[in-house]
Each structure stands twice: as C-alpha cells, then as structure tokens.
Amino acid sequence: MPIVPPTHSVERSLRRAGARIVVGLDEVGRGAWAGPVTVGAAVTGLRRAPEGLTDSKLLTELRRKALAPVLADWVTAYALGHASPQECDELGMTAALRLAAVRALEALPVEPDAVILDGKHDYLGGPWRVRTVIKGDQSCICVSAASVLAKVHRDTMMAELGEGHPAYGFADNAGYPSPVHRAALEEYGPTEHHRLSWAYLDALPRWRHLKRVRDVGGADQACADEQLTLGF
C-alpha cells in the first residue's frame, strides 16, 4: 500500500482559529527498556515538505538518516527534550513524557500558539493549546518532521551509550526489546541506562530485587499493561 504524504491540513485549521505559530510534537522511546524518552518539536510553517517525509517508523534507517539533516535545515525551528530513565522511574511515563515535551518546547527559539500532538492522549496539557491527532506522525507535516528528528537523534544517542555496553546491542535495538537485549539482561542485569520500574524485570529472577515499585494509574497503567506483552 503506498504511503500517503502528510499535509498541513490540521495546521491550517489551527491557523484559521488564530494560531500564528504551530508546533508538531512526537515522542520516541516510550516502550524501550533502556534510554531516555525523547520528544521532538518542529515548526515548519506551510512550506512544501521534503520528498519522502512521513512517520519515522515507516522509513528505513538509511532513509531516516538521510532525511534528518535535510529536515534540520528545512524546518523553521526544532528542538528535542529528554526525560532520563531515572525520571521515567520516578515520575511514570505520562509525567516523563510531559517533562520531555516541556523541555523541547522551552528549547524552541519561538513560542508556539498551538501544539499538534501525535496520538489520542494529551500528556502535555496547559498552558499550551493542544490538538491531539491519531497517527499525526503520518498525517501532519510538522509532526512527521518531529518524528524523524527525534528518532534519528535518540537512535544515535543509544548507539553511543551502547559503546560502553556492547552486549546489549543498543546500536541495533535502541534500548527496545530484542533477543540480544534480553539475553544480555539475563546474563548481566540492567545497566545504569535501564528503567528499573519496567515490567521486564519481573521475568528476571536473578535481578528482580532491583525492581523499583511505583503506583501506576490511568495512562501509566495502560503503559505498564503494554510492557507485559514485551516480556520474555
């Protein structure tokens, strides 16, 4: 099935409602066992997007890496925000996502009047004016741009972290579940880059004592339930 290119449709509707500067946000790393959760923020205006832009997950690694520097020069502005594994453990994923998003927004050189947020859940909230869009990373140009920039940056970051922990395969799995990652966890346990409140530790009897227990609810409970499907 051919990929339908993203458009400025949602951004145009926000502009008609009075928003002058619209930013797209997308996250990467939510379901990883290791590494930060990262949120990309991109302001694109209404210019025509570079050829081939879409959700980063629909692009090959080679295409993402080639497109990222083109996007960095093309966008009006962009920034990235991170929440560390420790912050993910302490705050829960919903609050960690908000923290990373706020850091990205505050790092922008312009102040947005409205935010297009990928997905159906508004983890950002006030004081920003937020429009959630399911599959916004496929349908909205500014969110697609944020998706690619965030994904390439975080993948590069994880590859660099992996140089100190080669057994875990971070350069290939970016901290997400994989057979290599799973085998390293069983043998060596979690590193300082792992999230210790995540459900994968329940399947590691040798390392289960390291598990950080935190009450979860709402969106965080949904995230915890999702992790159970990523186990061993």
Image (cartoon, rainbow, N blue to C red):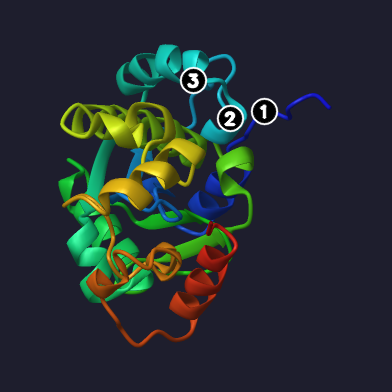
Q: CA distance from mark 3 to mark 1?
A: 18 Å
The residue carrying mark 2 is 54
* Residue drawn at the location 37% of the way across and 51% of the way down: 186
As displayed, is residue 174 above or below residue 202? Answer: above
* Disc with the residue nearer the chain's start (2 vs 3): 2
Question: Which of labels 2 and 3 is toward the front?
Answer: 3
Quadrant of the image occupied by residue 52: top right
Residue 43 or residue 232, whichever sits in front: 232
Please, what secondary structure does the residue beneath circle 1 have?
A: loop
Q: Is residue 147 above or below residue 31?
A: above
Q: Please provide percent x and percent y for residue 148.
A: 44, 31
Which residue bears the numbered disc 3?
61
**Helix, strand or loop at mark 2:** loop
Is residue 58 placed above or below 106 in the rendered structure? above
- The image quadrant where one finds the N terminus is top right
Q: Looking at the image, do the residues carrying marks 2 and 1 touch, with CB atoms under 8 Å apart?
A: yes
Q: Nearer the viewer, residue 51 or 12?
A: 51
Give the residue drawn at x 49%, y 84%.
218
Q: Which residue carries the number 1 mark?
A: 5
Instruction: Report the disc number at residue 45.
Output: none
Do the CB atoms of the residues marked 3 and 1 lie less than 8 Å apart?
no
Earlier in the chain: of badge 3 and badge 1, it is 1
Q: Residue at x 43, y 68 (%)?
A: 199
**Type of amino acid under label 1:** Pro
Q: Name the residue located 51 percent from the left edge and 62 percent from the top edge.
A: 131
Q: Position of residue 110 (x, y in %)?
A: 22, 44
**Does 190 sit above or below residue 218?**
above
